[in-house]
Amino acid sequence: MKIKSLRLLALALLGGAVMFTSCKDDPEVFDAPTVTIAEGSSTVLNITDRPLYELEMNITINAPGKIESITIERSKLLGNTEVGDVFAVDNQNFYEQTEAVFVNSDNINYEEFTSGTIDKIEYLVSVTDKQGEIADAKFTVTMGAYTTLVETDNGGEIWHLMGSGKGCWDLKNDVAVSAYDNTENETLGRYLISADNVAESTFTGAWDSNEVVWTNSNSQEITTVGVGAKYVKANNFDYELGIKELALDVFNAAGTEGQLTAVEAPTVDDIYIGVLGDEVYVIKITEITPDADPTAKASLGVMKFSYKK
């Protein structure tokens, strides 16, 4: 009886030893890692902030199982199709740490959006811990809405006031307007009134949109009234791109001192932004010919221009 009891005690002790050893060898299980981007998941660019956007993503990673690797991938897309290669960066600064806090910076060129090359940029931040667990977070950059101005088919022109009866131009309706009658229809169409204001004057292409007082060949003084549109010279404006919001931004930045109804001494390739209420026009001078003669009259000269609206 005594021997049997000793055998049972020995088996019990052996079982306990096996159980103790088994528990000691079990690996510790940690919570899965997490990735947080303080700026959220996306941003929308404002066209008037161009040409560059300086992106900063404040990233926090928690990894109780210790960090094995951190990767940031940048993809450029057009219509959800990747454009070009994916740019990847491995951050090795936090190996085997349980937390990582850092900033990912990038410069984004607006022209990639406005040229139609891309419509989205995606950043994918991924972490893998020592357990093989993976977590990620995505951040997207898109362009906000904007309006592209459209060029008129034939452009416009203003002649010397004494030259052809086409001394004014209507930007809204794309037609020449006479400088002689101040009827409502005529007045509302005078966005540009030729301002070389006497019969003998040399044509320079100057114009006014408010009022021009001039003398005809019979020495009569005539007042030609216009709509009062204001213009800002903006030779650095991207005429080919022709974005309305950027045109307004340049116009407003000129302030009241730079927003004028009268334009003097324009030259070929000059660019002017014109605004009347909600109407926006971008004008590019294409020709100034002081000796152009449309009707064999004494007063010569024409200025031609293309314009977008």
Image: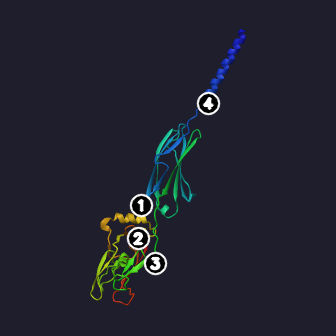
Give the number of the mark in front: 3 or 4: 3
Amino acid on which disc 4 is placed: Asp
Where residue 213 sits: x, y (%)? Answer: 28, 80
Q: Residues within 10 Å of mark 3 (few under 14, many from 20)?
A: few
Amino acid on which disc 2 is placed: Tyr
Give the number of the mark in front: 2 or 1: 2
Q: Residue at x 70, y 12 (%)?
A: 5
Q: CA distance from mark 4 to mark 1?
A: 60 Å
Query: Is there a contact, CB below 8 Å, between mark 3 and mark 1?
Result: no
Q: CA distance from mark 2 to mark 4?
A: 75 Å
Q: Which residue is mark 2?
A: 281
Q: CA distance from mark 3 to mark 2?
A: 15 Å
Give the number of the mark in front: 3 or 1: 3
Which badge, 3 or 2, is on the more N-terminal residue?
A: 3
Q: Which residue is mark 4?
A: 26
Q: Residues within 10 Å of mark 4 (few under 14, many from 20)?
A: few
> From where the camera sits, is residue 288 visible?
no
Which badge, 2 or 4, is on the more N-terminal residue?
A: 4
Q: Residues within 10 Å of mark 2 (few under 14, many from 20)?
A: many
Q: Residue at x 61, y 27 (%)?
A: 24
Which badge, 3 or 4, is on the more N-terminal residue?
A: 4
Amino acid on which disc 1 is placed: Thr
Q: Which residue is mark 3?
A: 154
Element type at marker 3?
Answer: loop
